[in-house]
Amino acid sequence: MTTATARLLPRARRFLRHRTRVLLLLAGWSLLESAHTFLGGYGLAKALDQGFLAGRTGVGLIWLGVTALAVIVGGLAGRGVFRGLADLVEPLRDGLVRQVVSRSLTHAVERPARVADSAVVSRLTNQTEIARDSFAGLVLVARSFVFTAAGAVLGLLSLAPQLLLIVVPPLAAGLLLFLATLRPMAARQRAFLQADEDLATQFGAVAEGLRDVVACGAQQRTADQAYGVIEDEARAARQLARWAAVRCLALGLAGQLPILLLLVTAPWLLRQGLTPGAVLGALAYLTQSLLPALHTLMNALGSAGTRLLVVLDRLTTGPGPAPEHPGAPPPATAQEPAPRAPAPPGDPRVELRAVTFAYGPAAQPVLHDLDLTVEPGEHLVVVGPSGIGKSTLTALVAGLLEPGHGEIRLAGRPVRAPSGTDPSLLRVLIPQQAYVFSGTLRENLLYLCPDGASTAALEAASDAVGLNALVHRLGGFDAPLDPGALSQGERQLIALGRAYLSPAPLVLLDEATCHLDPAAEMRAERAFAERPGTLIVVAHRITSARRADRILVLDGNRATCGTHDELLERSPLYRDLAGSWQPDAPERAENLTAKPRSLG
């Protein structure tokens, strides 16, 4: 008995014990099917021996009529079986769904900082449906085989006991070969389901970090990683198919050899005194009842049975620790840098000329005729209500979106024009949902450094953005990372450290510090302000705006740019956002006890 079977057996007993009435109902209908099986061969033998071969056609027709009546009764019994099956199968599915949801919610409550488990989608939909369908199929075929075999064996004994000596040995040999494939089939099925969950987890992680992936120019690498996970699932499916071929061999041995032996030994059986009707009845039992039931049982156990065992084990005990992410990028220090054009010297100038953008041809423009110039080395903060277009602006500057009208130039070139320069060498965008992958902390920090960086540079960057405490807690730069175990703020700190180390002279922070407290946010923004290069920040606190050289206020289709003092006089929206905050307030307004007003 396998470990999975030992775990599931007590639960299976409890489940069935609470549904005794349904099982008795199924057994009652199945007895009628067993009578149908018995009469299918016995009635045919009697119709031939006592009727047609004896010259009594009426007797033969009566026996055939009894056989036909048994077919009708068997059909009615099958109808009753399907009615009772739903009362057994649906409670199983409902219980599994409740268990998966309860476990997922419990994990979420126990570890609120952990990101959502994307594999739950596979368990809640695909795997629970596999369990329900497989269980229903097994109940049907197992019940059918037991009662069909009972009727067929009773019929063969009634006709001639020596028929069992011819039929049973090849059936047993094929069944033993088939049983030998069950454990390998279960292992391959488990590997296939694990690959399916890995695929769901991979695409969930990529979807969360898609904006970072595109902004960093890592589309091809991410696609290669996704193709690798897809190939793993395809490889598991091929291995499963090979064992299915062995199962087909067992089916052939058990299904065809008994018929062949019966035909070959028919002359000998007739010489031993068996009647032609008995031989024909035995052939009917094999071809019409016993062998079809056996084939169905072997198919169900070989496919549905192994699937059910593996799926129930996973759904009721839960998956083990998450494996290393199959899509983790290789260490940046070990990667051979691709040939690239050198980055433009100096800090880039950002120019927007009459830029208009809308999400659809008939949609209201988010930005309309926006003119803006960000000088090299300048620190610009973008503020405005939620949904006004701040993130859209950073995506346009990063080249992720294309304006419907106007032009955006970076370092004198159109931002989306092919130039041969790796985009990540010119600008880096850190969105609100920071992207962190499985691997070491060093690999995460050097993700945008194709030429690597020294440990001293890593330490300086960590100290600048406030990452030291997390580095110490994790165990150093070479400590492995589990993204799901990190809080949103910790993931943002790692992404900020990655951007700080990047050679890109333009940094775009799209609410990249929204999960940090005010003191940590102030430290990170000051680090980037002191870092050589141009800085554009989408702010969610008024204190961030105060630290900038200039502030851009987005208000519908209008945009106003200036210093803090200028905007207090010129922009009613900015005055409303700033509220009662006073320009001469001390820096203590930015410590952990402060509660600055949100900018949306």
Image (spheres, rainbow, N blue to C red):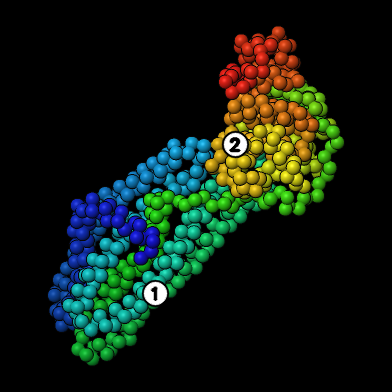
Name the residue beneath numbered marker 1: 177
Q: Which residue is drawn at 78% across and 50% down?
A: 338
Q: Which of marks 1 and 2 is in front?
A: 2
Q: Please tell me which residue lies in front, 593 or 408.
A: 593
Q: In which quarter of the image is residue 153?
A: bottom left
The image shows residue 228 at horizontal and vertical percentages of 61, 55
Dot 1 falls on a residue whose secondary structure is: helix
Could you classify mark 2 by the number of other residues whose Cα lies within 10 Å: few (under 14), some (14-19), or many (20 or more)? some
Q: Quadrant of residue 387?
A: top right
Q: In this view, does 242 lie above or below 269?
A: above
The image shows residue 569 at horizontal and vertical percentages of 71, 8
Res. 490 mark: 2
Q: Quadrant of residue 574?
A: top right
Q: Which residue is drawn at 65% across and 19% down?
A: 543
Query: Disc 1 marks which amino acid?
Result: Leu
Res. 467 mark: none
Marks 1/2: CA–CA distance: 55 Å
